[in-house]
Image (spheres, coloured by chain):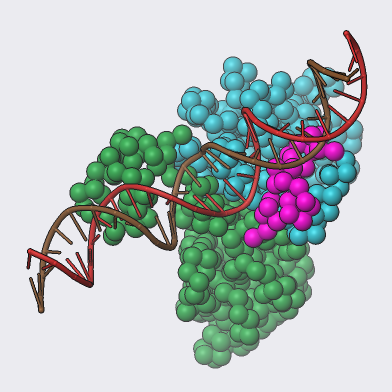
Chain colours: A green, B cyan, C red, D brown
DNA sequence: TGTGATGATGTTACCGTTAACATTGTACAA
DNA sequence: TTGTACAATGTTAACGGTAACATCATCACA
């Protein structure tokens, strides 16, 4: 294995100088700098993260803690995981996946948490490593967090439907006592209040067939053209099934979902949806956790939120 | 950080003895053994993988190389990734995710490859680290591999449909020139040959709406009750949509899919399918790659295949 | 011309673990 | 009784990198 010494010998300097070229380039003279860089190139040197980790008292391992039920893993996680892993790798870190909040933390540098509930937060705060949440933290919680801007997302969706000419706009939300569910609903209410449309909010669990049943019972009230803003793509899938048995989509009834991972491509017609920008989210999460690890000080902006965009497909053009 | 020395002091032995208790328990006397174990417990010692890695010339990092198009990531990968990461962690390894087959291999110990094509194999063989493929390797390929037994899976599915009383059994396969597609088709053909049923094989791309169109044109030939064995759940989804416009499911027409991740729970009625046993697959993959890394010799059984099981839901009980 | 500040580079020791070798004690055969 | 094999444990020297400190040359200024 090529190491610092090999490079040092080639460049006729000490290995410390080589180390400095890599970690503190400002501390070496330009000539030596290029000399060393050529030597690194010539011998094909790749820094050994393991040795680096040992002396730095790090592990260069970040744990992805998935607190949601694994059985129902949403395809979201594949995208998020891939993006996270790539961003981490770029910073020299690697990924560990755990489902156990009580696992020991002595061999990791930080934790990214997904699928957490309110009651997990106290346990997470008590940990002795930096933690970043996926999903907005409550205001009283000191943990850093990154989230898609749920309210803005549904606002965009509702405004978009209004702009398309739909005036009878329903919202089918999630019957879950979680912040993101409330924020999405708030997005709908905010726009309807602003536009002066009639507010029609219903809730269901996150299952296509339940949404199907709900909307089937609702349809006789529709004042066409009707639009249905759904809290998730899964709900939208059920809504779509119910609606298309009776009405033409999108002429008589438009449907828009939220998430934009996989399900939206599966529906017939293809679903217009608010897409979670996972690449960006992963980037922000990694930036957050790494900054907490590498500088003792936390970033001033602790709670980052990323505004999502609409992907227009076939269920909305009036 | 609690280290070997702390344990050694507590147990009144040298740190080497502690190390041996962990790595070569057969080399220490029973009394010292328990003594040291108590000391480890008492001080809360967790071995430092980083130091271990340095002296062992390892990295304890396995790369998951995903060669399929990321845009169309199947939800499969979330399940597989989670399982792989968990199995790896148990052996002290961590995960790195890469989409680039040409990435340097100096800082990893092994590679798990998914979504590979025939033309990738020569590049993979040329690598200087152990490689294990997800998906059966061709017979002339020296790389180790783990796969679901595709032929056995469709055989089970076809036999099951026959046993349910369907006699007019169609197979909707994948129009892909890949081994797994051929094996699944072979499974259908084998059972139909054995049972003496009429062989009806059609192919389509892996899209629900294409399968829908195909089956719509096929339906007038059905001699009820008809069964349709599908190469993937995605195809089954389209088949289901087409069939249920005309026939009763499952009384007049039964449908069975393959994969059992996510899509099967989304259909209405819920899809009977052949489920990929990802937990088991991940376990075998990890066992393969670790054995290649830790012993110089490869396992004698290089190509492992795991037989899947049927998950009976609502699209098949006649 | 001597002195001290400054910037560039080298030297040393250590991070926590393990392989290899050294040492000790004990049992047993000659 | 003595020598020897062997089992149990200890000692040493790495693995590859970096922080902290030491050294050296250069230059400005009194």
| Residue A306, horizontal then vertical, whole percent | 49, 72
Q: Is residue B250 above or below residue A103?
A: above
Residue found 54% across the figure and 31% down from its top: B129
Q: Residue at (75%, 59%) from the top-left corner?
A: B44
In front here: C26 or A201?
C26
Q: Is residue B302 above or below residue A282?
A: above
Looking at this view, is A19 or B185 the one in front?
A19
Q: Which residues are magenta?
A: B1-29
Q: What's the residue at 64%, 60% (across, down)?
A: B1
Mark yes or no: residue A142 visible.
yes
Judged left or right of residue A108, residue A33 is: left
Is B23 colored magenta in this rendering?
yes
- Quadrant for the C terminus of chain B, please: top right
Disc tally is 0
Q: Position of residue A74 (x, y in %)?
A: 67, 58
| Residue B27, above or below A135 | above
Q: Which secondary structure is most common in the magenta stretch?
A: helix
In this rendering, would B254 be left or right of A112? right
Say if B303 sits above or below B98 in the image: above
- Identify the residue at image location x=27%, y=39%: A12
Residue B77 lies, in percent from the top left, at 63, 47
Does residue B252 belong to the magenta stretch?
no
For residue B158, say whether it is visible: no
| Residue A94 coordinates in the image, percent (x, y) | 55, 51
Q: Answer with left or right where residue D25 lies relative to residue B315.
A: left
């Amino acid at each position: 294995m090529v190491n610092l010494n090999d490079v040092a010998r080639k460049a006729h300097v000490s290995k410390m100088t080589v180390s400095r070229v890599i970690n503190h380039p400002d501390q070496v003279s330009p000539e030596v700098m290029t000399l060393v860089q050529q030597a690194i190139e010539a011998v094909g040197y790749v820094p050994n993260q393991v040795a680096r980790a040992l002396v730095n008292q790090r592990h260069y391992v970040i744990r992805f803690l998935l607190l949601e039920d694994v059985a129902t893993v949403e395809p979201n996680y594949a995208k998020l995981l891939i993006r996270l892993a790539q961003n981490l790798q770029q910073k020299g870190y690697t990924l560990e996946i755990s489902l156990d909040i009580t696992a020991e933390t002595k061999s990791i540098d930080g934790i990214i948490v997904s699928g957490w509930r309110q009651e997990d937060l106290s346990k997470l705060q008590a940990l002795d490593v930096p933690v970043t949440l996926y999903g907005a933290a409550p205001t009283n919680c000191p943990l850093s967090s990154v989230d898609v801007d749920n309210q803005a997302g549904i606002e965009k969706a509702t405004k978009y439907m209004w702009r398309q000419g739909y005036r009878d706009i329903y919202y089918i939300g999630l019957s879950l006592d979680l912040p993101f569910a409330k924020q999405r609903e708030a997005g709908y209410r905010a726009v309807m209040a602003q536009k002066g449309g009639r507010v029609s909010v219903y809730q269901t669990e996150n299952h296509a067939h339940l949404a199907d049943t709900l909307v089937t019972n609702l349809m006789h009230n529709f004042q066409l053209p009707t639009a249905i803003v759904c809290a998730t793509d899964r709900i939208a899938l059920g809504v779509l099934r119910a609606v298309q048995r009776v009405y033409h989509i999108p002429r008589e009834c438009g449907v828009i979902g939220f998430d934009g991972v996989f399900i939206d491509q599966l529906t017939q017609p293809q679903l217009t949806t608010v897409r979670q920008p996972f690449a960006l989210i992963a980037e922000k999460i990694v930036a957050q956790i790494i900054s907490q690890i590498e500088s003792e000080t936390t970033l001033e902006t602790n709670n980052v939120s990323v505004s999502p965009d609409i992907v227009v497909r076939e269920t909305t053009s009036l």
